[in-house]
Image (cartoon, rainbow, N blue to C red):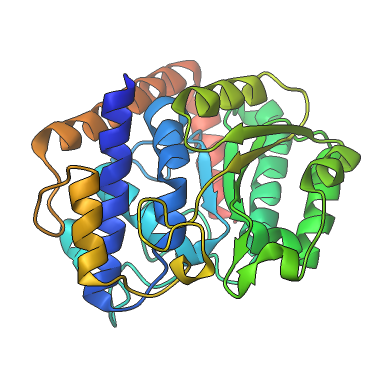
Amino acid sequence: MNHSHLKSMANAIRFLSIDAVQKANSGHPGMPLGMADVATVLFAKYLNHNPDDSKWFNRDRFVLSNGHGSMLLYSILYLTGYISIDELKNFRQMGSKTPGHPEFGLTSGVEATTGPLGQGFAAAVGMALAESILKKQFRINHYTYVMLGDGCLMEGISHEAASLAGHLKLNKLIALFDDNDISIDGATCLSCSDDVEKRFLAYGWNVDKIDGHDFDAISFAIEQAKKSGKPTMICCKTIIGKFSSRAGTSSAHSGAFSEEDIKQMREKLNWNYEPFHVPEDVKNAWKKTVERAKQNYTMSFQRVTRKEEKEWIQCQALG
């Protein structure tokens, strides 16, 4: 998949996110604009999942710890066939399946409820731990990917969870850090001067630092992480609110943009479509990512015996 396709796919995430926030007049567009490139590479090339069987036992897990950026996830869930376009149009509305923060059990494809910052990161460590325990009995072999922001790393729970993951060498855990130096109140330097790289190295993690808008760098970092014998933290240097007039500022974090700003973004990225419209070629590119993932789905079941499948179903029933 070439860079041109990846750019269009990432821009679909960006504009669906903006359109939903505008319609609701509420939400957090900055994070989806900044992390769209990272998310596109992950889902296009690496994440194994199946929208036709969202509870497939050997699927990769994706947790959005910085859950306020929920429209990034909802946009992808629409583009990969988990939810309808009407659900995006109902973002943050009473009774919708697209609440302000992702909720497990409400929306197909959401792996964990994430609101309080750091909670999703800790949940991802738990998922990776479960994989390491169950793989001997069920021949499970999947990864847990967690996307997180500065706010998640400021919370105490992230320290405890990261320490445990490093100690247990949970090498199937890959964290994608939205390293944009911005919090809701301003630059992160106002309240935090942690060296994230040294911190996670001290926990026993691998750490990689990349340009979060460079598709090749993102791919290479994920491939290297998958070969590691330790959990990996990929610090993705990104621009919050990328391509908007608020890019790189705390004002990009939350709230609807002006109509003029959105118009300029559409012109800048040559996205000359009505709100919530994604051109067929971009939709097809996203469908191909699901086809890739489904190949791994079929192969996974070919390797699992009926006895193992039955035992797994019984295990799930017990909680």
- Nearer-the-camera pick, 53 or 315: 53
Picture coordinates of residue 239 (x, y %)?
50, 50
Regarding residue 280, the answer to whether it shows in the image is: yes
Q: Residue at x 31, y 34 (%)?
A: 7
The tally of labels here is: 0
Q: Is residue 299 placed above or below 89 in the rendered structure?
A: above
Q: Quadrant of the C terminus?
A: bottom right
- Nearer-the-camera pick, 133 or 240: 240
Regarding residue 19, the answer to whether it shows in the image is: no
* Horizontal arrangement in the rendering, residue 44 relative to residue 96 (left or right): right
- Nearer-the-camera pick, 315 or 51: 51
Q: Is residue 231 placed above or below 71 in the rendered structure?
A: above
Q: Residue at x 37, y 30 (%)?
A: 44
Q: Is residue 97 placed above or below 313 in the rendered structure?
A: below
Picture coordinates of residue 280 (x, y %)?
10, 36
Picture coordinates of residue 116 (x, y %)?
62, 71
Q: Quadrant of the N terminus?
A: top left
Picture coordinates of residue 80 (x, y %)?
28, 41
Q: Residue at x 17, y 46 (%)?
A: 271
Q: Residue furthest bottom?
A: 94
Q: Residue at x 25, y 36 (%)?
A: 8
* Horizontal arrangement in the rendering, residue 17 relative to residue 246 (left or right): left
